[in-house]
Amino acid sequence: MTATPRAALIAAVAAMAAVVVASNILVLHPVQGTFGGINLADMLTYGAFTYPFAFLVTDVVNRTFGPAMARRVALCGFAIAVVMSLYLATPRIALASGSAFLLAQMFDVSMFNRLRHGRWWRAPLISSFAASLLDTVIFFTLAFSVILPFGLDAFATESAPLLGLAGAPDVPRWISWALADFTVKLTVAAFALGPYRALTARTSRA
């Protein structure tokens, strides 16, 4: 491997770890304020806006260096992020994030590779959408539901109107967070097509 690919892969691992650690910290902080009468704290956490960029990193590496290297970057980023999250977030968040991250990233790599020979936007968009769904279900279930008996977040498990909507049925806040988080992930994944195209334009034309 030449110096340039090595440097690019080190940068990818660092970016992956930074995105995941930042997201694990930010998911503990609900968005404050109201919008259209909706209490945003019942609907969103700041982590929803950062985590989708982990899929951008994976897809760029996959397109540029292939699926084997994308898996290696995901595994390295996973290991670093879990260790750091144990200290900077909470053990339960680290466990949930690590489990969701590893499964979703491996799924993303496999699906991207199956679709990589189609139109340039097809593989990153579809693989990110599908992997985001898997990630959301695993992470929020393990992080905040009563499926695990330890480290429950009282605010997350309190009941509030679904998505903060007046008249909606009361559900634990984490369910609204999961639904809103998935919606944001889809939006960010679509937005990330621009950076993805810019970063992989030469490879995509090859």
Image (spheres, rainbow, N blue to C red):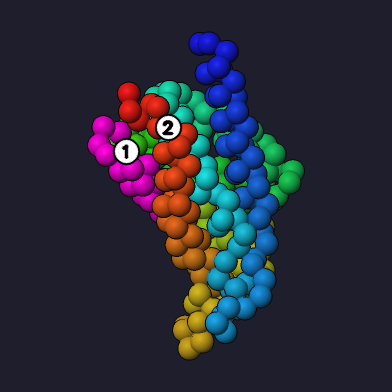
Residue 111 at x, y percent in the picture: 32, 38
Question: Helix, strand or loop at disc 1?
Answer: loop
Is 48 in front, or is 192? 192
Left or right, 170 with respect to 63, comes to right
| Residue at 47%, 83% in the rendered image | 169
Question: Helix, strand or loop at disc 2?
Answer: helix
* 117 drawn magenta: yes
Mark 2, Cα crowd under 10 Å, few <14 / some 14-19 / many 20+, is some
Quadrant in which residue 32 is drawn: bottom right
Is 161 in front, or is 111? 111
| Residue at 44%, 45% in the rendered image | 194
Mark 1, Cα crowd under 10 Å, few <14 / some 14-19 / many 20+, is some
Instruction: Tell me which secondary structure the magenta stretch mostly adopts.
Output: helix
| Residue at 52%, 28% in the rendered image | 73
Q: In this view, does 187 lie above or below 61?
A: below
Distance of label 1 from label 2 (alpha carbons)? 9 Å
Q: Give the range drawn in magenta.
A: 116-134
Residue at which label 1 appears: 120
Residue at which label 2 appears: 200
Left or right, 40 with respect to 112, comes to right
* 202 drawn magenta: no
Q: Which mark is residue 189?
A: none
Quadrant in which residue 103 is drawn: top left
| Residue at 70%, 50% in the rendered image | 89
| Amino acid on which disc 2 is placed | Thr
Q: Is residue 36 above or below residue 173?
A: below
Cβ atoms at labels 1 and 2 below 8 Å apart:
yes
Residue 161 at x, y percent in the picture: 53, 81
Left or right, 162 with respect to 47, comes to left
| Amino acid on which disc 1 is placed | Trp
